[in-house]
Image: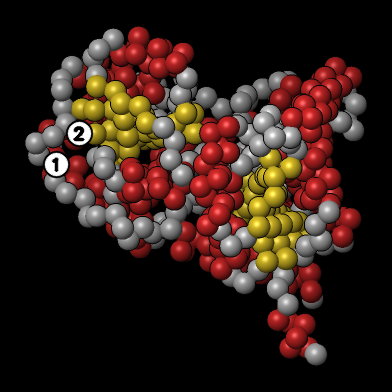
Amino acid sequence: MTARINSVKKKIVLVSSGQPSLNPRLVKEADALDAGGYEVTVLYAYWNAWGTDLDKKLLPHKQWRAVRTGGDPEQKRVTYFLSRIIHKFSLLVTKHTGIKYFTQLAIARSSYFLIRETKKHKADLYVGHNLGALPAVVKASQKHKKLCGFDAEDFHRYETSNSDNDSEVILKAFIEDKYIPQVNYLSASSAQITNAYHQLFPAKKPVTLLNVFPFNNEVKQPQLNTSHPIRLFWFSQVIGVSRGIEDVVKALHILKDDNFELHLLGYHSNQTIDFIEQLNNGAGKIFYHQPVTPGALVEFAAQFDIGLAMEPGFSVNNDFALSNKIFTYMQAGLAIVASDTTAQSALFDQYPSIGTTYHKADAQSLAGVLSGYNKNRNKLLESREASRLLAKNTLNWENESKKFLTLVRQTLNKAER
């Protein structure tokens, strides 16, 4: 009897107010849990059309189950419209009356439906990704008298502003202060974000889980580039302003030569492209690429020479974040040029051979770094090789997933004891 009980798979529900294709960290955790012998369900919500197209390519190849809730503007328009009404009403009430009840519905467009859907799933552990999912996992765990965790990919309360008087900061801080003390574990994506949450919630003892990726054996060893322009690469879900792109365009103006190409990947509007092209004014060769699935990103990036991590440090969170850009570049075998935010500077202090930092928002500093690589192509190759080697031996999901699975296992074991 005991053996049969122990053989039953533990059920884990991961919840996000975004979409799987737009959250590689969520997908990696779901894959790791599935490979670790857990029964995994991912609950998520519509975010945008191109993310939906990527989901259609991604999800059929997964062993875990994915359930979308909260409607969408194409197939479930009424539910989607209702979710927007609930969200906007809750935001207005929260902002103008101070009534706290509606904060759990104001935090994301899909919050009401995520809470309702998550409660329907009886599981041993509920894990929230992003603040829109945090109330849902806590409430579901309370209903079923089970456990919940929260993965803080960002220092959420200070994502967009550092002002404690900002309405978004007030809303996010209230959600964190109310629900994080109720979770059974807390993880974060950089040492700096971990320390920030530890200061706020010392009893939680958050664990750092870096935004690294599985090592990709399909990527070829970097080769010396002696005759072609240096190909610079930057990606994000959306190509937009105030993301550091201005730094590199201005740097290319300063360099005034044909030895560089700038490649930008992400969803982009005509308005954004017009802004970049006006800023560029023909000084540099800029190429635009549509988003690819997370699984194809590393191999796509491997065709370039330098990966750009140009975080402007406009908020506490942006200064503390270690984005998946850097770890994608490592897997692709790119040299990395990064702005000197607190988190990125700490990483380069620890692993200086993978690339170079420049003074954020300083185009002249960035131009100097790029010029140095152009003049010394052997140094460029050395940085690319060091980056790839670090991804192979140390900073990869094979290693980080063990920490994640240990955290999950320890959380479940504590409850059993």
- The percent position of residue 106, horizontal first and vertical second, equals 79, 30
Q: Please state which of residues 397 and 187 is positioned toward the viewer in this rendering.
A: 397
* Mark 2 to mark 1 CA distance (whole Å): 8 Å
Residue beneath the point at 84% across and 45% down:
116
Q: Nearer the viewer, residue 40 or 52?
A: 52
Q: What x and y, as percent, mark residue 267?
A: 47, 28
Instruction: For label 2, count other residues whose C-alpha is less than 10 Å away and answer few (under 14), some (14-19) or many (20+).
Output: many
Residue that badge 2 annotates:
230
For this view, does 303 lie left or right of residue 400?
left
Q: Which residue position holds label 1?
A: 225
Q: Residue furthest front?
A: 75
- Looking at the figure, which quarter contains the C terminus? bottom right
Q: Residue placed farthest to the left in the image? A: 227
Q: Are marks 2 and 1 in contact (CB under 8 Å)?
A: yes
Above or below for 3 versus 20: below
* Secondary structure at numbered mark 1: loop
**Please, what is the three-letter code of the amino acid marked with disc 2?**
Ile
Q: Is residue 401 visible?
A: yes
